[in-house]
Image (cartoon, coloured by chain):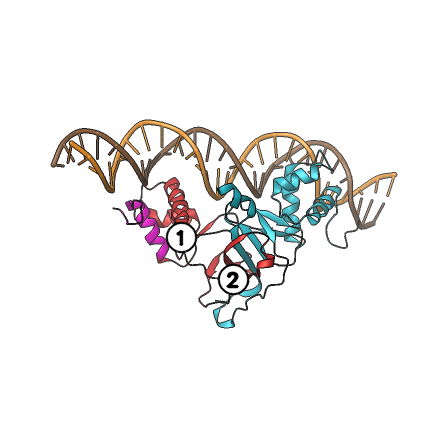
Chain colours: A cyan, B red, C orange, D brown
Amino acid sequence: MSTEMGFRLSKQRKVILEELRKVTSHPTADEVYDMVREIIPRISLGTVYRNLEFLSSQGLVLKLGGPGTQKRFDGNPKPHPHIRCSVCSKIEDVMCEVDVPALPEEYTRGFDIHNCNVEFVGICPKCKTEMQ
Amino acid sequence: MSTEMGFRLSKQRKVILEELRKVTSHPTADEVYDMVREIIPRISLGTVYRNLEFLSSQGLVLKLGGPGTQKRFDGNPKPHPHIRCSVCSKIEDVMCEVDVPALPEEYTRGFDIHNCNVEFVGICPKCKTEMQ
DNA sequence: TTATTAACGATAATTATTCCTAAAAATTTT
DNA sequence: AAAATTTTTAGGAATAATTATCGTTAATAA
């Protein structure tokens, strides 16, 4: 593979990106590790972390935060709304377009605004039933 | 000291909440630790973590996530939009009301939606100048 | 094919956070 | 107001997530 992109596409990096693009579940780093180990059993967890970080710095994947303990990753780098479960921290995609609110210039506090994340928070069906 | 809300308001807990309400800077737990130590020098970092967690579970403060490494806390518990710097992870309040997008029922994926976070992402004035 | 060097695997180190326990403080009961 | 009870604290140990190090491997360029 070429370096026209400015970086090497190792087997590990390729598989990590492919696997992440296959799912809509926003896995954590160790979940990606589990997924990729099915294909490259001897891959190291450090490699997974290194590549998720790298891919997100290249804008190829999205790194999601949230008050949960682990970061989550999204193979779709285009900003789009999410729903997060406040109990189990699971994050899902919202499949519809949502009107992104615009921020009037006078409220930007000198920031150059690049985009806007919209995150709905609630309780997922699984946690809802487990609560009873 | 006690509140009518069913929990005790220790000196430590009171000062943590007061200091957090004084600022709009969304400090991390260790920044809160520094702020509170000015008043209670012997307070422990564990106490700060425990109380920030407790206060956020009571809905008195907001725990903010984001792809940065540390959680940040907001003394204003009413959901409101933020601006985050993608370089230094600093979070600031947006002082204007923003129309929160509504999520049509058919897209909720079975979640009970409780609220919606809106976060603008950009580069803060400080990081902008430091880039040159 | 060979040279270069980014990326790898293994593991150590670091960072953020949580857990544990005896002591202190707050509250309630006497 | 002293004693008993309950909650919270400080400090340190423990854990979990992530990042860094370093010798080796393999992707790309010459």
Left or right: residue A17 versus residue B130 is right
Q: Secondary structure at mark 2?
A: loop
Place of residue A11 in the rendered image (x, y in percent of width and height, measured from the top left):
75, 42
Magenta includes B9? yes
Q: Quadrant of residue A58?
A: bottom right
Q: Is residue A70 visible?
A: no
Rounded to the nearest angstrom, the CA distance separating label 2 from label 1 is 24 Å
The amino acid type of the residue labelled 1 equals Val
Q: Is residue A45 above or below residue B103?
A: above
Q: Is residue B108 above or below residue A109?
A: above
Q: Is residue B44 above or below residue A80?
A: above
**Badge 1: how crowded within 10 Å, few (<14), some, or many (20+)?**
many
Instruction: State the residue position of label 1.
Output: B61
> Residue at 63% across / 40% down in the picture?
A31
Place of residue B129 in the rendered image (x, y in percent of width and height, measured from the top left):
53, 63
Q: Is residue B130 above or below residue B72?
A: below
Q: Which mark is residue B124?
A: 2
Q: Out of A92 and C9, give the one closest to the viewer.
A: A92
Left or right: residue D17 versus residue B96 is right
Q: How many marks?
A: 2
Query: What is the magenta range?
Result: B1-21
> Which mark sits nearer the N-terminus, 2 or 1?
1
Circle 2 marks a residue in which chain?
Answer: B
> Residue at 32% across / 53% down in the picture?
B18
Circle 1 marks a residue in which chain?
Answer: B
Q: Is residue B61 visible?
A: yes
**Badge 2: how crowded within 10 Å, few (<14), some, or many (20+)?**
many
